[in-house]
Image (cartoon, grey):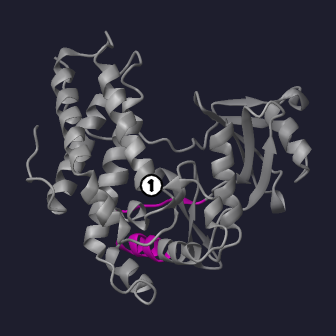
Amino acid sequence: MTSLAGTGRRGSALARTPVEVRTAELEQEPAVRAWRELGAGPCPERLELLRRRHKSVVYRLPGVGRDGSDVIAKQCLWQISLDERAVYELLRELPGAHLTYYGFFAEPTREAGWLFVEDARGDPWDPGDAEQRRLAARWLAELHIASSRSANAALLPDRGPAWFSGQLDLASRGIAAGFANPALLPEARPVLDGVLRLLDEVSSCWLEVEIACAAMPRALVHGDFAERNVRIRCEGGEPRVLAFDWEVAGWGLPAVDLPNIDLSAYAEAVQRVWPRLDLAKLAQLGQLLRGGIAAVSWASESLTTSWPHGAVCDLVHYERRIVESLAQLGWRPNRVSR
């Protein structure tokens, strides 16, 4: 019998080693054509495919950026590309470290768009390292405070309670669809049953979620601030935090970025602006929304594939997060069904 005990989430970080390298007839490649139309730098001598998904494709254009740096070319579905474009355009107005944004190119059909951003060179961020947790806390505090005052915040995609309510619905529908998958192992069905019942419990206390969110500030949030999307780069002897993959970023609750950082350092940095924040509650709310609801929604997309077992293992982990958060928030007894 296959065990469902594994709980590690498979990361989605861009591979440093390309999946495929192309050097011939580059002028015919959509990524290169879009880069040339943008006119932000020279044409590359090669094109490196880093990742391909059903909603996006990512390439590296070596040596075409400022000072000979590499550029990431990311093609996304139209609305996703517009949302991420709005985030990058706001970021370059804000103080603090961020990747160079070269621009946006719209496909003529308006079915997809291209984003061109500096390649995030540096060491992976380690949330197990105390100093790096403090560094990330101070960087996020600066981002949240500065963006909360921006006049262009209205241009950002909504990532507030309504968006997470939509993720909750998507998660329930995705899990329900997974039951029909012939590749689903029999022992996985109780897992899906338990997660589906838990999501119903979350729905039943959604008013409490909205009340808690109403008392929180709003800012630009990354939405997926994790090891795979953060680098530490030393410049001038000082470490700098650089975040990338802002696909689910938007105008929302700083809570969603806080579970893996030093809360004391964050509290110290934001106290002058938000002196009455309950940081412990904020972190639990962030874990419920991002680490629980959104994570379940994204994992459920794999339940109808030919290999749903990894997603089922992840759901066991996310279920525990939701149970723990609801208990800490006082909305559910602290018990785990498995």
Q: Is residue 83 magenta?
A: no
The correct choice, above or below, for 307 with respect to 242 in the image is above
Query: Residue 184, position in %: x, y?
Result: 28, 16
Element on which disc 1 rests: helix
Indicate left or right for 199 with 29 as reference.
Answer: left
Quarter placement of the C terminus: top left
Position of 239 compared to 39: left or right?
Answer: left
Is residue 43 visible in the rendered structure shown here?
Answer: no
- Decide which of 3, 163 is in the foreground and name it: 163
Residue 178, located in which quarter of the rendered image? Answer: top left
* Rendering coords of residue 217 (x, y %): 43, 72
Q: Which of 7/301 is in front?
A: 301
Estimate how packed mark 1 is, as few (under 14), some (14 to 19) or many (20 or more) residues with alpha carbons within 10 Å. some
Residue 205 against residue 193 in the figure, above or below? below
Residue at the bottom extreme of this rendering = 272
Residue at 82 percent of width and 57 percent of height? 68
In the displayed structure, would residue 282 be above or below residue 110? below
Q: Residue at x 33, y 59 (%)?
A: 210
Region in magenta: 122-138
- The answer, for residue 286, to whether it is visible in the render is yes
Report the amino acid beneath label 1.
Answer: Glu
Taking 232 as reference, is 91 left or right? right
Residue 297, image x and y in percent? 38, 38
Residue 133 among magenta residues: yes
State which quarter of the image contains the N terminus: top left
Pointer 1 residue: 227
In the figure, is residue 336 to the left or right of 184? left
Vertical order, 311 against 207 (above or below): above
Classify residue 171 by image quadrant. top left
Residue at horizontal 31 percent and vertical 9 percent from the top: 182
Q: Residue furthest top?
A: 182
Residue 245 in the image: x percent, y percent?
A: 58, 50
